[in-house]
Image: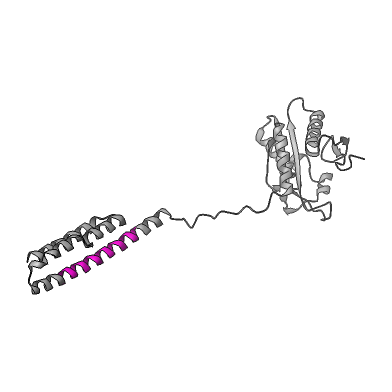
Amino acid sequence: MAIKEELEALRDKVKANLKEIKNKIELTNEKANVLGKKGPFAQIMANMRNLTVEERKEVGMISNQYKTELSDAFDAKLAELNDAEINARLLNETVDVTLPGLKANVGSIHPLNQTIMELEDLFIGMGYEIAEGPEIETDEYCFEKLNLPKGHPARDMQDTFYIDPEHLLRSQTSPVQARTMEKKGGAPIKIVCPGKVYRRDADDATHSHQFMQFEGLVLGEDISLANLKGALLEIAKKMFGQSNKIRLRPSFFPFTEPSVEVDVSCSRCGGK
């Protein structure tokens, strides 16, 4: 029967077309064109008036069967396109779960670190370099290379934390000077050395077993106490204010010669 053959051919054609559809818009349009009231199924069924009652019944059953079959095929294709869309999205949005997470910025800069950074900026502006060294030092670099042999009075003052006979928690940042001089090999040096130091002091309001030092070293021709005085005065004025009175006075330290200390007038009372 010609109508039955047309229906079968239409079904096979639609199934073949479904394999070529790449997106849901094409699928929606194809479904409306095939199964809609003005689609090919409706046009074929319009010719049933020329059939007998038995033939109409048979063709009607075949037509409904093919329409149901194609409707299921359209639904399956839609599910396939949805799965492909989700998989593509997941592929594009892949997250490497082994990457470290973003850390929230909490708190602020510690006052000690803030002071050190301000001092570093000031000294860098004066042509100094920042030098650093290990906090666990050898006795050789912490004392011997700084002309502080065993029995030197400076060692008694610093009562050091020894890890073993040759290793210690540095009691001063001066080992950085020794390491820098070795590295430079006689070339001019202009450095400052900030960092933590450790001494066996009893903790109280003015002492701590761990504290910060910030020292400098300048080596070169025509370097004198005047250079030290100029640097100290410049830093003191920038840190404490131009209006404060600054005084350098002679002092005694068993590990430096000559030695001076810096006095700064009170910023609240104006030195009264």
Point out residue 254 in the picture as x, y percentages from the top left corner.
84, 41
In the image, what residue occupies the spot 80% across and 30% down?
230
Q: In this view of the protein, which residue sits in the foreground, 188 or 119? A: 119
In the image, what residue occupies the spot 79% across and 46% down?
150
Q: Quadrant of residue 55?
A: bottom left
Q: In this view of the protein, which residue sits in the foreground, 138 or 250? A: 250
Residue 152: in sight, yes or no? no
In the image, what residue occupies the spot 82% across and 44% down?
154
Q: Quadrant of residue 69?
A: bottom left
Which span is picked out in magenta?
61-84
Residue lying furthest right: 272
Q: Quadrant of residue 104?
A: bottom right
**Quadrant in the picture for the N terminus:** bottom left
State whether residue 80 is above or below residue 258: below
Q: In this view of the protein, which residue sits in the foreground, 217 or 94? A: 94
Seen in the image, is 61 located left or right of residue 267? left
Colour mode?
Answer: one colour
In the image, what residue occupies the spot 37% across and 59% down?
86
State whether residue 16 is above or below residue 246: below
Seen in the image, is 220 located left or right of residue 57? right
Magenta stretch, main secondary structure, is helix
Residue 184: in sight, yes or no? yes
Q: In this view of the protein, which residue sits in the foreground, 189 or 164? A: 189
Point out residue 25 in the picture as x, y percentages from the top left corner.
30, 55
Point out residue 64 in the picture as x, y percentages from the top left corner.
19, 70
